[in-house]
Image: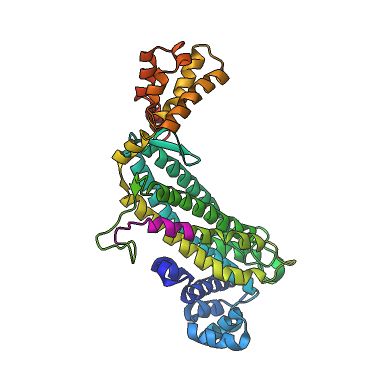
Amino acid sequence: MISRYNRPDIEKIWSLENKFKIWTKIECLIAEKQASLGIIPKKAAKDIIKKAKFNVKEIEKIEIKTKHDVVAYINNVSKYIGSSSKYFHFGVTSSDIIDTAFSIQLKQTAVIIRKNLNECIKNFKIKSKKYKNTMMIGRSHGIHAEPITFGLKLSSFYFEFKRNLERLDQAINEISVCSISGPVGTFNSIDPRVQDYVAKKLQLNSEDISTQVIPRDRHAYFFSVLGILASSIERFSVEIRNLQKTEVLEVEENFSTNQKGSSSMPHKRNPVLSENLTGISRYIRSAVIPSLENIVLWHERDISHSSVERIIAPDITIATDFALVRLNGIIKNLKVYPKNMKKNLNMLGGLHNTHNIMLKLIEKGLKRQLAYKIVQESAMETWNNKKQFLEVLLKNKELNKLLKNKDIEMIVKDNNDLKNINWIYKNKIK
C-alpha cells in the first residue's frame, strides 16, 4: 500500500519482521509440544526455543537461490539453532506455518479495524441523538418526498455499521484458525495433539479438516465482510457529497483554515474526504472476487491463492483501516446547517404534505384512486407554477366538497409530521 493511505500500527503487521516472528513462535510451540509427547528430544526443543532467531536480509538472500521463502527461513533459523536444528520444522509442511501465521496476521489487523469501526458507531449514535429533532426533507430518487430528521437519517447508518460489526466479529472467528496437519492434511507426520496445543496457545480455533491448507472459504468470508463494510462507508460518503452540493448545502465536511479547494478557484470547498472514501471503497470491494476465486484450489492444495493474498491481505486491511479512521473524522467534524434544511424543506411550497391530504380524503370516504387524482392535480399546479400548495388546495373545488378550509390548513401547517420519532428513539436507539 502506498504511504498516503498507510497507518503504522497496521502496516507493521504485514512486515516481514512480524511475519517471521510469528513463524518462529509457531515453530517453537510445535517443538515444545512434540518434546512433551516424546516425539523429539527435550534438549532439542529447549535449544529451538532458546536459540531460534532470524535475519530478514539473510532470508531474502537465501531465497534468491532456494526460490522458496519457507525453506530460506528454515535454513536461516537453523544456522542459529545449531545441531538441534534437525528437529526444527519437524514433521510439518510449509502451509502449516504460513496459513496459521496468516490467520494471526488477519486477526491482528481485524482487532484494529474493529476498534475503528466501534468509534464510528459511537459517533453515529452521538450525532443521531444530537440531531434527533432537526427537520429536513427526505428524498427518494433524489426528489423531495416527506420530512424526516437528520438524526433519523444518521441512525440508519448507526444500525448499518452495528451490523457490520456483528459481521466482522463472525469473520474474525472464521479466520482465527490453526492448521498443523502436515502434508495433504492427514497428520501422517505430525501428532494431531500438536495442532490443538498450538491453537490453544495462539488463541485460535483448531481447523477441522485442512487438506494441506486452511480452506479459503474462510478468507473469502472475511474479505467479503470488508467489501460490505466498504459499501456502507461509501453510502455515507455519497450522502455527504449530495447534501454538500452548493444548491443543497445541508451539511458540509469540515474545511480547515489553510485548506485549499482548487488550484484555480479560491472559493471552492469540495467534499474531498467523502470523494476519497468513495474511491477507496471501490478498491476494498475489488478484493472480494479474487478472494472468492481463491476458494477453488487443485486437489489438496496449489499456490494460485498465494500471490493474490500477498497483495490483497495487506493492501485491503490497510485501506479499510484508513477508510474507517477518515470516516470517523468526517462524522465527528461534520458541519450541519439546520436553516438550510428548513429552507429546502419548504422549497416546494408544502408539497411534502400530499400524502397526508390524500389520506384525509380517503378517510372522508373517497376511493384511493380518485383521492390521488385530486391531490396530484393540485400538486402539479403547485410544481409547474411555483405556487404555494396550500393556496392551490384551497381553490380546488372537488377537494373543498369534502374538506373545510380550516381542515386543509391544519394538515398543511401541522408540525407534527414526525410524531413517532420519540417512539423510534425510545425503542430502537437506546
* Residue 339 placement (x, y as % from top left): 29, 39
Q: Is residue 6 above or below residue 347?
A: below
On screen, residue 398 versus residue 394, left or right, reads right
Marks counted in the figure total 0
Taking depth in this image into account, of 89 and 137 the one nearest to the observer is 137
Residue visible at 50% across and 61% down in the picture: 107
Q: Is residue 17 visible?
A: yes
Query: In which quadrant is the C terminus drawn?
Result: top left
Residue visible at 41% across and 23% down in the picture: 392
Residue visible at 46% across and 64% down in the picture: 318
Taking depth in this image into account, of 50 and 348 the one nearest to the observer is 348
Colouring rule applied to residues: rainbow
* Residue 282 placement (x, y as % from top left): 52, 59
Taking depth in this image into account, of 145 and 320 the one nearest to the observer is 145
Taking depth in this image into account, of 226 and 69 the one nearest to the observer is 226
Q: Which residues are magenta?
A: 266-279
Q: Say whether residue 277 is magenta.
A: yes
* Residue 40 placement (x, y as % from top left): 61, 76
Q: Is residue 33 visible?
A: no
* Residue 332 placement (x, y as % from top left): 32, 50
On screen, residue 94 versus residue 320, left or right, reads right
Q: Is residue 291 above or below residue 143?
A: below
The residue sitting at the right extreme is: 299
Q: Say whether residue 77 is magenta.
A: no
The residue sitting at the front extreme is: 385
Tell me the quarter of the picture where residue 277 sits: bottom left
Q: Is residue 218 above or below residue 26?
A: above
